[in-house]
Image: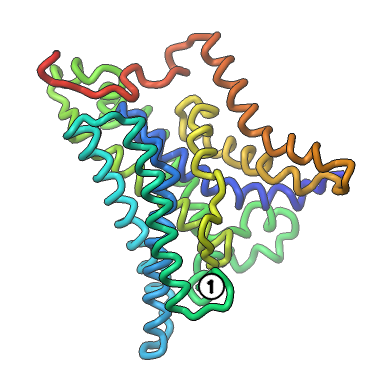
Amino acid sequence: MINFALLIPKAVVQGIPLLYGSTGEILTEKSGNLNLGIPGVMYVGAISGVIGAFAYEQGLSRYPENGFLAVMIPLLCCLLGSFLMGLLYCFLTVTLRANQNVTGLAMTTFGVGFGNFFGGSLIKLSGADVPSIALSTTSKYFSAGLPFADRLGWFGKIFLSYGFLAYLAIIIAVFAAIMLKKTRVGLHLRAVGENPGTADSAGINVTAYKYGATCIGCMIAGLGGLYYVMDYACGVWSNDAFGDRGWLAIALVIFTIWKPDIGIFASILFGGLYILYLYIPTGMDHMELQQLYKMIPYVVTLIVLVITSMRNKRENQPPAHLGLPYFREER
């Protein structure tokens, strides 16, 4: 039998990086940009935060420990690295009008290589005997839950035992949903993604919205990489440890039909499905079954894609101009 009291907290922790990645990609796609470089962006965000945390911990020999700096330095480094990745993507696809699919895939390859290079360099600098680096001093500030969670039994374990980045992910997703549905900025952003020519004729700065949504989306996605290293992995960086979480975050965008609020529950569901094979009976007779369980998130995404395509409801479809370059002269 599956112990759901144990599975749910693990699913939440597993799903938070997916929530960050999908929320960032939803904002990006609402502007009409299809950024398949999200896995690379998350990787760059993670390694940028690790570099900041490593620099901070190296300075502890001369300065006293400071919790505020332990959080802010990696956080700002992560946001800066992710922002630069978003800026690079926009420069190539919006300004130079390069193919968005090819650019995104190239950025994924670049991001993984960038992370592995600097991650390997930090491992050598630390003189570790294993191919990883542990940033436990910084990590404890990211993974600390609410102090009274342990006294509330199962309720505290399920709802209050996570680091602040987990709650920040939910806040960002709710804010993004409200912004897209209820604000003038959200209306303009959706107009740019649906028909940039019409939006341009109405006086909306298409280029500014594409740059802004994509760069902010990349910064949000980068936080998912930082969360994975500093909270989920307890501050341990190992090259190529992310697996396919970046691609799963992109799949989650389709599953949520481009709605960040639905992404909160969908990410937890995907997180549970992603690790479900760890909670089924083990043994030689169940090895093939475990491999099938690993396929469930992707199979569910395909089913949702088929259903939404058959229903053909406009609000459940991707932006009409998604992945297409905008030439103002062709209006």
Residue found 35% across the figure and 41% down from its top = 106
> Quick one: quadrant of the N terminus?
top right
Q: Residues within 10 Å of mark 1 (few under 14, many from 20)?
A: many
* Up/down of 163 relative to 41, above or below: below
Residue found 69% across the figure and 57% down from its top = 157
Q: Is residue 179 visible?
A: no
- Which of 243 and 179 lies nearest the eye of the viewer? 243
Q: How many circles with numbers are drawn on the protein?
A: 1
Residue 54 sits in which quadrant? Answer: bottom left
Q: Is residue 21 left or right of residue 132?
A: left
- Which of 203 and 302 lies nearest the eye of the viewer? 302
Q: Residue furthest bottom?
A: 62
Residue 76 on image: x %, y % = 33, 62
* Up/down of 286 relative to 230, above or below: above
Q: Secondary structure at mark 1?
A: strand
Q: Is residue 44 visible?
A: yes
Residue 194 on image: x %, y % = 30, 19
Residue found 55% across the figure and 44% down from its top = 244
Q: Is residue 313 left or right of residue 94?
A: right
* Up/down of 144 relative to 102, above or below: below
> Quick one: quadrant of the C terminus?
top left
Residue kind at label 1, given as amino acid type: Ala
Residue 41 on image: x %, y % = 39, 48
Residue 58 on image: x %, y % = 40, 82
Residue found 74% across the figure and 39% down from its top = 291
Name the image colouring.
rainbow
Residue placed under numbered mark 1 in the picture: 134
- Which of 93 and 146 lies nearest the eye of the viewer? 93
Q: Is residue 278 left or right of residue 218?
A: right
Q: Residue furthest left?
A: 329
